[in-house]
Amino acid sequence: MNEKECLGKKIRTLRKAKKITQEKFAEMIDVCPRHMVKIEMGQVYPSFVTLKNISSVLGVSIQSLFENEHYDSPENLKQKLCEIIGNLDEKNLRFLYIVASHLD
């Protein structure tokens, strides 16, 4: 299972635990139901704004959505993150800095 699939599964599990239908959840987080299906199926990553909305509605932190035993080791994640950062243009590098500086 890849990272997108793990994230989608976690979101789906938390949503179902709160007894919220997929359609209602999509409405609550301001995405179309079809996009919500793609997120939960692990076909797409949600945007940062959508992640904020998901975490708010589910009552969890954004970070907790990414906590999963199926992910790479911290060392592998750091290496992948360094590679990603190294390939970012200035605009996206600034955006990443803003996002990272607001993490708890």
Image (tube, rainbow, N blue to C red):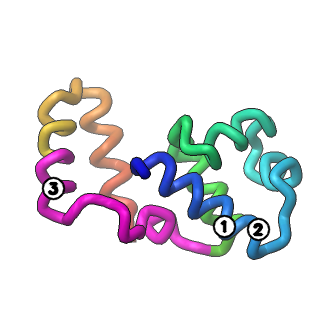
Residue for point 81% across, 52% down? 22
Nearer to us in this view, 104 or 28: 28
Dividing the picture into quadrants, the one containing residue 47 is top right
Q: Tell me the kind of residue under disc 2.
A: Lys
Q: Mark 1 to mark 2: distance in Å?
A: 5 Å
Q: Tell me the kind of residue under disc 1.
A: Thr
- The boundaries of the magenta stretch are 60-81
Q: Which residue is mark 2?
A: 16
Residue found at the very far front of the displayed protein: 1
Nearer to us in this view, 92 or 6: 6
Report crowding for label 1: few under 14, some 14 to 19, many 20 or more residues within 10 A (C-alpha).
few
Instruction: Look at the numbered discs 1 and 3 and tell me whether their residues touch, using CB distance below 8 Å.
Output: no
Residue 53 part of the magenta segment: no
Q: Which residue is mark 1?
A: 13
Q: Which residue is mark 3?
A: 76
| 68 w.r.t. 90: above or below | below
Q: Secondary structure at mark 1?
A: helix
Residue for point 65% across, 55% down? 53
